[in-house]
């Protein structure tokens, strides 16, 4: 019987270029260290069930493996293999899944059911595409330190986790291991990403593919929308530095559609000025790209960080001119500017949602503390995270050196994982990058 194992994948923020990307300009997105964690327990041969335990959304469901529509998924005209690139959902397969979704959380509220069905749909589509009626009975337990539906890529991070776990279970991934050649790592990440994209299609309908690409590969990507409905080009940016980041949620709800429409209306009313603002955002993204890919770039050089920070600040000003900031976002920027400890911009659609601040390394500790207290007092939600970290990671078997006395490390079983009371406890128990020297988590790291 395979040992319990874990997979983890990060969320993301847009660092440069939101809104301009709608008009064909490039944008840059990078990982944040808030992540989803998936624990997989294989059950003994006497069991024939597959269970999802997703407590963040209150989903707990078990299917009998044999009753799932394997025949439809394995029909010769439908069968997909682990190496295939699937670019649209097959309606017949979707229809075959529907009866198995209708039994999920029948008594939940309509809103909760929608969320449950989205996650269960992504899981079943991947499970039936990659597994077989002979798949071992399993429990998939998922917890995330990412807020759900806040524009931070929570859905992509869970899809990357599911894709990686299922591909590992059918033994179609090599590694990850420390001395894996870069091109071999890239093949594995591409494989994971293709199926993560399928999961994203189940949750979102028509995803751009950016979130899953940055979540799987880590660091950052540059992406550009193509004309005539073709998928965007997504280029990994491996030189992106790991930077301490303050992520602040304004807690003001926003709609991406409304903000995009607002910029559209501004462009109609003031075409020349609006186009120049969008062009200026393009220049900002290009300047950041040139800096990060320059052979002389040194992430530890304070001048480079200052340059990047100023670009963040300029980008925010341009977004404000486009009318997509919000008084709550301006308040966050004002507080950080007043403390003089970093560079701030809104991230994503704006009109609410989150702001990011790159902290100055020399920032005065007292001032930082004062800022945190002020943000708390004014009702903002804040996360101290790192930008540009690793993508998907694997902990096989689920055993960590957690500073306990357990010989051979601490075994993470699903109950222990489920019982961690909050996100801080999840990070303490299994967090990636939390304890610098913690052995165990491994990553595909193409250079
Ligand atoms: N922690 C989680 N557990 C289970 N499902 C999740 C979790 N986080 C996200 N999801 C799934 O992803 C969907 C959220 O996607 P979306 O609204 O695009 O938010 P985001 O911008 O964070 O990706 C949820 O409806 C749910 O189906
Ligand atoms: C405003 C936009 O550029 C980014 C939206 O980001 P989000 O929905 O806030 O994650 C829209 C888009 O790219 O589709």
Image (cartoon, rainbow, N blue to C red):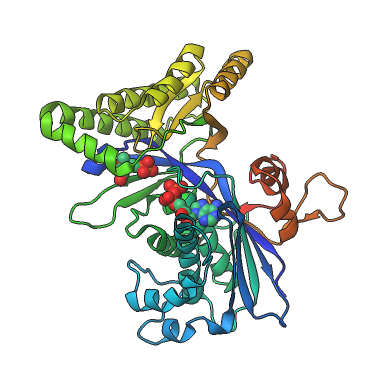
Q: Between residues 292 and 124, which one lies in front from this camera angle?
A: 124
What quarter of the picture does the N terminus occupy?
bottom right
The tally of labels here is: 0
Asked whether residue 245 is in view, the answer is no
Q: Quadrant of residue 172?
A: bottom right
Give the image location of residue 294, x and y in percent.
39, 33
Image position of 381 with respect to 233: above or below: above
Q: Between residues 238 and 158, which one lies in front from this camera angle?
A: 158
Give the image location of residue 196, x and y in percent.
45, 61
- Would residue 75 be found to the left or right of residue 318 on screen? right
At x 47%, y 12%, the residue is: 338
At x 46%, y 39%, the residue is: 239
Image position of 389 with respect to 202: above or below: above
Q: Between residues 138 and 85, which one lies in front from this camera angle?
A: 138
- Would residue 128 be found to the left or right of residue 314 on screen? right
Image position of 180 with respect to 309: above or below: below
At x 30%, y 52%, the residue is: 233
Give the image location of residue 158, x and y in percent.
52, 56
Image position of 194 with respect to 332: above or below: below
Asked whether residue 421 is in view, the answer is yes
Give the image location of residue 345, x and y in percent.
40, 27
- Would residue 298 be found to the left or right of residue 417 on screen? left
């Amino acid at each position: 019987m395979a040992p319990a194992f874990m997979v983890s994948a990060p969320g993301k923020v847009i660092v440069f270029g939101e809104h301009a990307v709608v008009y064909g300009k490039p944008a840059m997105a990078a990982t944040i260290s808030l992540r989803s964690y998936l624990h997989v327990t294989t059950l003994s041969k006497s069991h024939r069930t597959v269970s999802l335990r997703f407590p963040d959304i209150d989903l707990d469901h078990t299917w009998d493996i044999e009753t799932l529509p394997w025949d439809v998924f394995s029909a010769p005209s439908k069968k997909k293999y682990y190496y295939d690139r699937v670019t649209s959902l097959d309606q017949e397969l979707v229809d075959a899944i529907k009866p198995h979704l209708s039994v999920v959380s029948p008594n939940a509220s309509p809103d909760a059911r929608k969320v449950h069905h989205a996650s269960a749909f992504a899981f079943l589509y991947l499970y039936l595409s990659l597994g077989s009626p002979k798949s071992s009975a399993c429990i998939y337990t998922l917890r995330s330190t990412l807020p759900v539906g806040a524009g931070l890529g929570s859905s992509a991070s869970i899809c990357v986790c599911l894709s990686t776990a299922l591909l590992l279970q059918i033994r179609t991934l090599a590694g990850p291991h420390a001395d894996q050649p870069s091109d071999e790592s890239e093949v594995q990440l591409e494989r994971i990403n293709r199926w993560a994209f399928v999961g994203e299609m189940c949750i979102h309908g028509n995803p751009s593919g950016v979130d899953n690409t940055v979540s799987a590969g880590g660091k950052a990507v540059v992406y550009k929308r193509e004309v005539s409905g073709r998928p965007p080009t997504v280029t990994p940016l491996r030189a992106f530095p790991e930077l301490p980041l303050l992520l602040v949620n304004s807690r003001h709800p926003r709609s991406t559609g409304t903000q995009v429409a607002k910029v559209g209306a501004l462009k109609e009313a003031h075409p020349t000025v609006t186009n120049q603002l969008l062009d200026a955002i393009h220049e900002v993204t290009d300047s950041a790209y040139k800096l990060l890919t320059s052979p002389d770039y040194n992430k530890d050089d304070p001048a480079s960080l200052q340059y990047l920070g100023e670009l963040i600040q300029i980008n925010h000003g341009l977004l404000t001119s486009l009318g997509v900031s919000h008084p709550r976002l301006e308040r966050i920027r004002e507080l950080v500017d007043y403390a003089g400890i970093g560079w701030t911009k809104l991230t994503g659609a704006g009109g609410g949602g989150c702001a990011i601040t790159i902290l100055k390394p020399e920032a005065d500790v007292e001032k930082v503390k004062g800022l945190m207290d002020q943000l708390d007092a004014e009702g903002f939600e804040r996360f101290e995270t790192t930008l540009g970290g690793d993508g998907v990671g694997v902990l096989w078997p689920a055993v960590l050196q957690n500073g306990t006395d357990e010989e051979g490390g601490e075994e993470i079983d699903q109950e222990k994982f489920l019982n961690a009371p909050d996100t801080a406890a999840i990070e303490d128990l299994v967090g990636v990058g939390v304890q610098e020297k913690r052995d165990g988590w491994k990553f595909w790291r193409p250079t």
